[in-house]
Amino acid sequence: MQIRQANHEFNFGSYPTFGHNIDPKQRAWIEVRGKALESNVRQLRSKLSKNCQFMAVVKADGYGHDAKVVSEYAIKGGASQLGVATLQEGLKLRSVGVKKPILILGNLYTKKDLIMSFKNDLMPTISSIRECLICNNVGKHFGLKFSLHLKIDTGMSRLGFEYNKFAQQFEKIKSFENISIEGLYSHLSSADELNSLDPKSITQLQRQKFQKLLKQINLDKNKRIKIHLANSAGMLLNKDFHFHMVRVGLSMYGYNPLAKIDKSLCLKPALFLKVKVAFIRIIDEGVSVSYGGKFVSSRKTKLAVLSIGYADGVPRSLSGKINAIHHNKLYPQVGSITMDQMMVDITGSDEIKVGSTMLLLGSEGDKTISPIDWARESNTIPWEILCSFKNRLPRVQVD
Ligand SMILES: Cc1ncc(COP(=O)(O)O)c(C=O)c1O
């Protein structure tokens, strides 16, 4: 009998291109709801002081939703500026045709990066005289003014000019002829804490410090420098935090960072995490499920194997702590979450079949599972849950 040997030569060109049109909903995927984003932005804007602008924070690929889609719908909802974390994120938005002002919230410190941001009309955040000087030189070189925002540290101890030295440094910055100060801002460290309305809270002290400094530097009103301080939590606290612009991320995506719910706001989640049932099995009582045998069935149990795991961004620390929704019913996840799959106890359901879709995050009927629930169970914050979803999960836009 002749045995055919595998041909190990790398000749990929000879393979037919199966798989190129693979269905994004074949395994697990993220549904991104543009209309929900747009409606959230509209609602949040209705809470703003008059003339206060809305910057949509779309860093980390729009908190995992897809920055291009988020930007498009946030702008439809009335966002007038966008905030990204990195030069690359800004360049990506420019390359897909986004025209609105974009602020880079992270720090650019090399001349090369600052030139790149200048050439692509991306405003850097400036935290030192050294960076101001580079920007001024870049502006001078091109015979133009380099638009940028200055940041002041009022208590976050991350980026920003040192609070006590800023007033003096500002005098010098004002003399730079080739920069245009478009904004002046600071960032709140603790606005989502329960005590944020307490006059002695970190948040109120940060606001007071910021306002004191604004008085001290006596801003030229004609220059229309935008003052901004608030993230989602700060903006929802009250109007004292609004100034000329707010920088909003989490609440635009549909989640309230404050424990107290504003009943007049009806934020809708823009991200639905869906997964297909890849296999169904029935196990007897006393059978262990998944790595480590941490779950042992207490009765005859019907299991659905879902094709999603920690390599998709579902934290393994959520093992045994989450549910999946099918037709408005909750089914508990059991056993350790594995790299690519997880098991759900569907005992009693005749509806769920191989190929059925289950919902891990989002709403169906009167059931909702939010990244806030996942964060509570895995001892983290909803921001981290949203930013953890990997590229292996296709983003599917639905309106
Ligand atoms: C500087 C800055 N502004 C605004 C935001 C938006 O925050 P949030 O998602 O809480 O609205 C962030 C996010 O971390 C940020 O770093």
Image (cartoon, grey):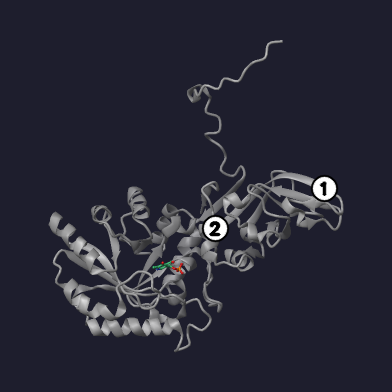
The percent coordinates of residue 336 (x first, y second) are 70, 55
Q: Is residue 160 left or right of residue 341?
A: left
Task: Please name the residue shown 68% across and 11% down the image.
Answer: 2
The percent coordinates of residue 30 (x first, y second) are 55, 52
Q: Residue furthest top?
A: 1
* Closer to the camera in the image, 204 or 96: 204
CB contact under 8 Å: marks 2 and 1: no
- In the image, residue 356 sits, relative to residue 41, either above or below, namely above
Q: Is residue 126 left or right of residue 229?
A: left
What kind of element bears circle 2? strand
- Say if residue 78 shows up in the picture: no
Whether ligand 1 has any atom under 8 Å from the Cβ at mark 2 is answered as: no
Res 148 quadrant in image: bottom left
The percent coordinates of residue 272 (x first, y second) are 58, 56
Which residue is denoted by mark 1 in the rendering? 282
Mark seen at residue 42? none
Which residue is denoted by mark 2 in the rendering? 271
Res 382 quadrant in image: bottom right
What kind of element bears circle 1? strand
* Closer to the camera in the image, 155 or 391: 155
- In the image, residue 321 sits, relative to residue 354, either above or below, namely below
Task: Please name the residue shown 20% across and 73% down the image.
Answer: 223
* Closer to the camera in the image, 151 or 251: 151
Q: How many marks?
A: 2
Residue type beneath disc 1: Ile
Q: Nearer the viewer, mark 2 or mark 1?
A: 1
- In the image, residue 191 sits, relative to residue 398, either above or below, namely below
- Say if residue 1 shows up in the picture: yes
Disc nearer the start of the sequence (2/1): 2
**View quadrant of ligand 1:** bottom left
Residue type beneath disc 2: Leu
Task: Please name the residue shown 57% across and 20% down the image.
Answer: 7
